[in-house]
Image (tube, rainbow, N blue to C red):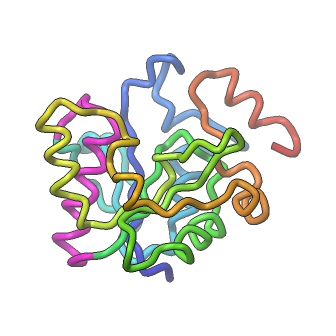
């Protein structure tokens, strides 16, 4: 078991995709099931989504604290629920559109967390830190709430650079080569469905 709370945000507008991405099927399973499978070893499993929209055995539905305000608001809900149920600790936070995440990916990020940081993010092929599919400490809750109250909606602002550990892309490739592929459009889903993706 990973000593983390796993949280998946689902139920967004999916404007570019054209329909609810959580239910889009890849290899016979909805994207939601692909992503939640990567976090099934977490001590606490939270599904941040509109009430009654999805139901998964072993996953607790947590309503979004600010519906329609994006993944930063979903992170706020995840941090709040994790703190209430586990006390201070780490949340593995993922978007529902990243079906190639694996348990090995989360284990890699968990190996990097230290007492000196409050977030762990992987670098993509362009050396950009990925704010989704990242670890966040519950100590960030007050910062995230303050950002949202001030009108901020960008996930990259959830933790300051000096509070963030970065995992090199080469390490991500080693354990989970396609982990950072996301599905924004039906074309993205078709690409992932090709053999070897």
Q: In this view of the protein, which residue sits in the foreground, 179 or 111?
A: 111
Give the mark count: 0
- Which residue shows up at 46% across the image and 28% down it? 20
Instruction: Decide whether the magenta segment is chiefly helix, strand or loop.
Output: helix
- Taking 44 as reference, is 197 left or right? right
In the image, taking residue 117 as reference, residue 24 lies left or right, namely: right
Quadrant of residue 149 within the rendered picture: top left
Q: Residue at x 73, y 43 (%)?
A: 27
Image coordinates of residue 78 in percent, x first then y, are 28, 56
Quarter of the view holding residue 194 = top right
46 lies above or below 15:
below
Q: Position of residue 196 (x, y in %)?
A: 87, 45
Residue 54 shown left or right of residue 61 in the figure? right
Name the residue: 40% across, 42% down.
156
Task: Tell me the magenta residue range.
Answer: 66-88
Residue 169, image x, y percentages:
70, 54
């Amino acid at each position: 078991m990973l000593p983390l709370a796993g949280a998946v945000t689902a139920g967004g507008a999916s404007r570019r995709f054209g329909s609810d991405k959580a239910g889009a099927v890849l290899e016979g399973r909805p994207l939601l099931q692909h992503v939640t499978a990567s976090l099934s070893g977490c001590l606490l499993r939270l599904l941040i989504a509109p009430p009654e929209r999805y139901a998964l055995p072993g996953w607790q539905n947590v309503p979004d604290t600010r519906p329609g305000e994006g993944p930063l608001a979903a992170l706020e809900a995840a941090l709040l629920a994790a703190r209430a149920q586990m006390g201070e600790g780490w949340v593995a936070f993922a978007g529902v559109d990243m079906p190639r995440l694996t348990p090995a990916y989360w284990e890699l990020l968990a190996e990097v967390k230290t007492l000196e940081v409050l977030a762990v993010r992987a670098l993509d092929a362009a050396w950009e830190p990925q704010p989704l599919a990242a670890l966040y400490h519950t100590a960030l809750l007050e910062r995230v709430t303050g950002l949202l109250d001030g009108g901020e909606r960008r996930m990259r602002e959830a933790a300051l650079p000096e509070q963030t550990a970065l995992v090199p892309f080469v390490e991500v490739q080693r354990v989970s080569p396609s982990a950072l592929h996301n599905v924004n459009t039906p074309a993205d889903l078709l690409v992932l469905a090709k053999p070897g993706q």
